[in-house]
Each structure stands twice: as structure tokens, then as C-alpha cells.
Image (cartoon, rainbow, N blue to C red):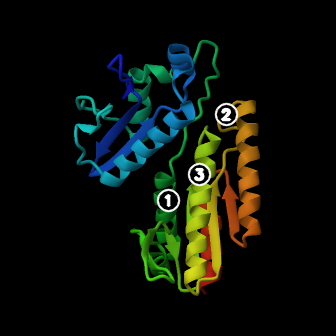
Amino acid sequence: MCLDEDAGEFFNVGVLFTHDEQVEVRMLDNFDRLQCLFDGRIDFDELFRTLHEIEVAILHNGPELLDELGSTIRLGAPLYASGFSAKEVLDEFFADVVTLGRPKRRAREVAFHYQSTLKLRNSIFNFMKQRMHAQATRIIQRSRYELTVGSGHRLEIDIPLMSAVASGSIVSGWYKNPLVVKNNLLQASADLNLIRSNTERDQAVISILVPDRESGLTSKEYEKLVEITRKQLERIRAMGIEIIEASSALELAELTIDWWSNCCI
């Protein structure tokens, strides 16, 4: 990514790995070294959102990607990679080529790795299929839902889980930047409220993955993230939307499955 168009210099800000028609992505989420290079010339909240949007676009488009994703965003030459898991490959290459992400000297060994909403959803979908079988297939929505509102206009909204009486969203709160988590929750609650207002699906729920103190965040980062997340969750509960939260994908999947099993019986 070119962070300074006047200089025209490109920096490695992420790694993607394609395998079996799937794409795995890991993007830069530590800006300590960038702050040393650019001081106040970069809006780091805006950069975090941009990197997040790039990842979402890559995951949506799949392995068939153009060499250039924009005038300041391009893919490097592809390399061969192998390993026991996609995560292992990503971690190894990320450490080698994304030098901006290397921790400063004496930094903690346990690094925080964000978890994207799309990956979290796919994990929970797989658990639901294993436990709920055909019932899961009826609930899981693989494409965006087309909603007709009172004015007759049609809107495409992101509702990953839906039955005849309920709608639900799955959100990752496992990001270092609280603004991304807040925006994800705002979007999810807005979409669910649209469904509640324009259909007979009165029940709504958000399943959210939240970091714990062992996630690799510093105490300051963790406290700031928790404070903003809690405030947002309280507002959402006040709207009448239920909240399911857990600090592991497996626990969140089990709680989500229990909720939907009870709702749809």
C-alpha cells in the first residue's frame, strides 16, 4: 500500500494465502512503527478502517483477484507456500514480509491477532451444520437479504441468520481498534432493526466474539476496548436485541446454536 502518494513508496501491509479455492488474509494491525515513520501525517483510525475494508473485499472476491485493487493498493508477486495449516503459513510469511508489524524490542511475545467477522461467521456456520444439520441450512443466509420497506424501496442488508420468527447477526469484536468494533455493532443492530420493523420477525440477537485478558492486548488497549464495547452492547440491549457473547469461537458457536435451537423449535 502507498501511504504517501508524494513519495510513491509502497509498504507491505498484509499477506493473503490461497488454497483449495479459499483465501486466508492477515492485515497489519499494529501501527507503532508507522507512527515512528509518519508522525501525525496519517490518520491511523482511518488507515485501520481501510485495511479492514481491503480484507473484506479480498474475502468476498475469493482467489481470483486483480493485481491492483486501487491506485494505492496492489498485490505483490505470488510466491509458493506450504505448511500444516493456513494460519501457520500466514504467520510465517507475515513475520517475514510485513516488517512494519514486528514488535518493538522487549515487546511481549504473545501478540494480538485480530479475528475477522467473515472468518468467525464461517466457523460458526460449520459448527451449526454439524450440530443442527438440516435446521442449520434453513437458518444460515449465505447471501444478503433483500428487504422491501414501506416506501416500496428494496434494500440489501447483511443478515447471516434468519428464521420465520427471528433474525440474527454474528460480529467479531476481536479487533485492536475499538472504532471498528463499534461500527460493526452499529451496522448489525441497524440491519436487525430494519428486519424487525418491516417483517414479522420480532426476535433479534447478536452473537459477538469479545477478547479476554489473555488475548494479547495490553492492559490499556483491553480496558479501552471493553469500555466502548460494553457501552455499545448496553444500547443494543435497550433496543430489545438480545446479546450472546463469548471469548472463544467454539463457546460462541455453542451458545448461538442453543439460542437458535430454542427459538426455532
Q: CA distance from mark 2 to mark 1?
A: 22 Å
Q: Do residues under tags 2 and 1 come within 8 Å of each other at their CB atoms?
A: no
Q: Amino acid at mark 2?
A: Leu
Label 3, on which residue?
183
Q: Name the one closer to the observer, 18 or 59.
A: 59
Q: Residues within 10 Å of mark 3 (few under 14, many from 20)?
A: few
Label 1, on which residue?
121
Q: What is the x, y in percent for residue 62?
A: 30, 51
Q: Residues within 10 Å of mark 1 (few under 14, many from 20)?
A: many
User: Is the residue 51 above or below the residue 158 in the image?
Assistant: above
Q: Which residue is at a point 74% across and 31% down the rendered structure image?
A: 220
Q: Amino acid at mark 1?
A: Arg
Q: Earlier in the sequence, mark 2 or mark 1?
A: 1
Q: Name the one closer to the observer, 129 or 74.
A: 74
Can residue 108 be seen here? The reply is: yes
Q: Which residue is at a point 71% across and 64% down the rendered structure image?
A: 236
Q: Earlier in the sequence, mark 1 or mark 3?
A: 1
* Dot 3: element: helix
Quadrant position of residue 66: top left
From the image, which quarter does the N terminus lie in? top left
Is residue 104 shown left or right of residue 74? right
Which disc number belongs to residue 85? none
Q: Which residue is at a point 61% across and 48% down the rendered structure image?
A: 181
From the image, which quarter does the C terminus lie in? bottom right
* Dot 2: element: loop
Label 2, on which residue?
217
Q: Amino acid at mark 3?
A: Asn
Q: CA distance from mark 3 to mark 2?
A: 20 Å
